[in-house]
Amino acid sequence: MAGGTNRYVALLRGVNVGTTRIAMADLRRLVADLGHTEVKTYLQSGNVVFTSAGTDTAKLARGIERALADELGLDVPVLVRSGAELTAVIEGSPYADRQDDPTRLLVAFLSAPPTKARVAELTVPAGENVEYTVAGREIHLHFPDGGYGRSKFTNAYLEKKLGVVATSRNWKSVCALRDLATG
């Protein structure tokens, strides 16, 4: 990017799916007010693409979290990934080549890599058919028998089992966000 700027995606956890409501116009303004540019939202579920001179994704995430708390009174976890990181996530999917339905493929983005001990203890809830692969700060998920909506293998389950914040996006959204962050 020209001028030493980088493209990023901020993934807000649990926005506009429960009681935490944020208007996307407010979210764009809030991110722009932090000094980021080319701010765009994708869908209504807390996905923000932006350009920044910053390079520390954890610091970028904390800035957005603080602004959400200070300006909107919301305690919302935020995870930030670069366009290059999203490209690597897509290229590293162990399931994309064997599933045509993007609603059955998801990526759970994690705030930090879970410990090996926690990963070793992670199991699929009884009676569910879920394939998963933990890869650093992401978990690739495949629901061959149906979508994520009926599963108990959720963000809350992953957070409890792994001890990190998680937020999931379906495959179509992951690909669209990568395209916005790299295009």
Image (cartoon, rainbow, N blue to C red):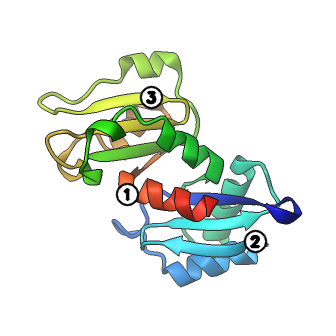
Considering depth in this image, is 175 or 118 the residue closer to the camera? 175
Considering depth in this image, is 55 or 118 the residue closer to the camera? 55
Of the numbered discs 3 and 1, the one sitting upstream in the chain is 3
Question: Is 154 positioned to the left or the right of 126 in the image?
Answer: right
For disc 2, the neighbor class at 10 Å (few under 14, some 14 to 19, many from 20) is few
Q: Nearer the viewer, mark 3 or mark 2?
A: 3
Name the spot of residue 50 as percent of width and height, x first: 66, 67
Question: Is 175 positioned to the left or the right of 84 in the image?
Answer: left
For disc 3, the neighbor class at 10 Å (few under 14, some 14 to 19, many from 20) is some
Q: Is residue 74 above or below residue 161?
A: below
| Residue on which the image places disc 2 | 34
CB within 8 Å, label 3 to label 2: no
Of the numbered discs 3 and 2, the one sitting upstream in the chain is 2
- Dot 3: what SS? strand
Question: Is 37 positioned to the left or the right of 46 in the image?
Answer: right
Q: From the image, which quarter does the C terminus lie in? A: bottom right
Name the spot of residue 78 as percent of width and height, x first: 57, 56
The residue located at (62%, 53%) in the rendering is: 83
| Residue on which the image places disc 3 | 134
Q: Is residue 32 above or below residue 141?
A: below
Say the numbered circle drawn on residue 172: 1
Q: Is residue 129 above or below residue 87?
A: above
Label 3 and label 1: CA atoms lie apart by 20 Å
Query: Mark 3 is on which residue type?
Result: Val
